[in-house]
Image (tube, rainbow, N blue to C red):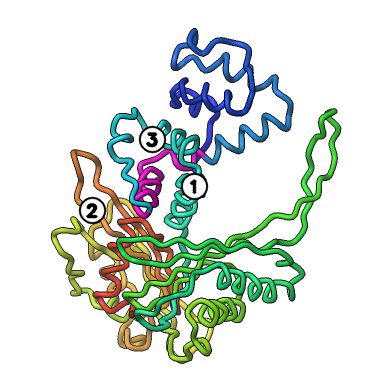
Amino acid sequence: MARQYSAKTFLRNVPNTLLEEYFKRRGIDLGFRWSHLHETDVDPVFLALEKLPDQTRGEIDTDFRMINDLCSAAGVLSILDHATLWQQDLGDRFASMKNAYERAFWTFLNEPHHFRVAGNFHEMDRRGGWHRRAVGQAIEPLTDADTRNALQDRLRLIYRRQGRGKYCHVDYYFRHFPDRHCFFAYPEDHADTDLGFDEKGRLQQRARRSAFEIIFVYRPDEGMLELHARGKRKEIMQLETAFCEVVLGLDELPSDGYIPFDMRILKDPTFSFPTEAEDRVATVDIRQLRFDVVGVSNERITFSVSPRGSEPGALHQLIDRSIHKSKLPLDELTVSQARIRFTFEPVNGERPKTLTFEVSHPDRCSLRDDPHDQIAKKYLRRWGIAHG
């Protein structure tokens, strides 16, 4: 989900020198001298923007919304992450800037490549609902232009059967800590129409052909392929097959690579969720468990506790009070979904950060890819919930 955007809040937080440079590069004169404008006096800028032609105002609004998405601590870290790959240290320059708005806007103006890739990284870090498959460790993926073109062709073939995917574009990026190879694919989506106004203010239908996003992430140390895409299981497997054959050079999709989450340990109320001090995890507790009844289709039982005011262990106490174990033993229940909450120790007097996510059988997890989510992923593997 994109950051909430407010034009006046955005303008108020971006230094006037950067705004002036932006409009100068676009050849737009807003009709006043920037040197006479107070830093937080945004009304003259806002009113001047309202007088611009609709198309120009729309282009500016698009730029500002893109920049706004990176105007946060996480967004700035994504910029620094990519700059480091190019042996460029922006830390000292960023340290002298007053806020994340200035850092993101400066990058947009002066390092457009870093800005574009950081936007992809940031979007990847915010995405949950990844499909996982073990495909083999330490494979050297092919990342050259011919390989990317071949992957584009395979994706076009998959989606042309659905009446879309005539065009496709694939970008590749490498990320550290941990190492992962990231492929962002953009196939063409179905044609659609929007209601909108033309330059004369007439309401019209306007056709558009947008793209949708698919993200492939290969983690060589774990031998794991993670895929973020919408579709049924058959379509997901087609995408995984295309990636494994084209990028990883495998003859076929590994038949034994499909590793579901194993959440049996979560039924044990005595399990302590051990962590290391360096990760600053204060507590781990289960907020919800969904059970499937073994041998009976379409029968599920879900237990959950309030997100506030309940102590660790409250969920298992609720289960003990609610299930007649002589009639329905826990052995006859399979955990098919769990909601887990990590609480991290506060840093620099700030409020403790919490991370709540869901793990669902067979292979879905709402964890994203930012640093705290990486810690949670590590412990899911260590506790035996996730394999690979």
Q: Secondary structure at mark 2?
A: strand
Residue 122 vertical placement versus 10 (above, below): below
* Depth check, front residue: 204 or 288: 204
Is residue 282 in view? no
| Residue 251 horizontal/vertical position (percent) | 52, 90
Name the spot of residue 359 as percent of width and height, x first.
40, 70
Q: Which residues are magenta?
A: 67-85
Real-space Cα separation, disc 2 to disc 3, in angstroms = 23 Å
Residue at image location 46% in from the left, 41% down from the top: 111
Residue under numbered circle 2? 344
Which numbered disc flags the more N-terminal residue, 2 or 1?
1
Q: Residues within 10 Å of mark 2 (few under 14, many from 20)?
A: some
Cα distance in 3D space between marks 1 and 3: 18 Å
**Element at label 1:** helix
Which of the two marks, 2 or 3, is nearer to us in this view? Answer: 3
Task: Determine whether, in the image, residue 329 is placed left or right of residue 344.
Answer: right
Which residue is located at x 32 percent, y 88 percent? Answer: 331
Q: Secondary structure at mark 3?
A: helix
State if disc 1 and disc 2 touch (CB < 8 Å).
Answer: no
Q: Which residue is tagged 3?
A: 100
Secondary structure of the magenta portion, mostly? helix
- Within 10 Å of disc 3 (Cα), the crowding (few <14, some 14-19, many 20+) is many
Q: Judge by depth and name the residue closer to the eye, 116 or 65.
A: 116
Task: Where is residue 261? Give x, y as percent.
Answer: 38, 79
Left or right, 229 with respect to 117, comes to: right
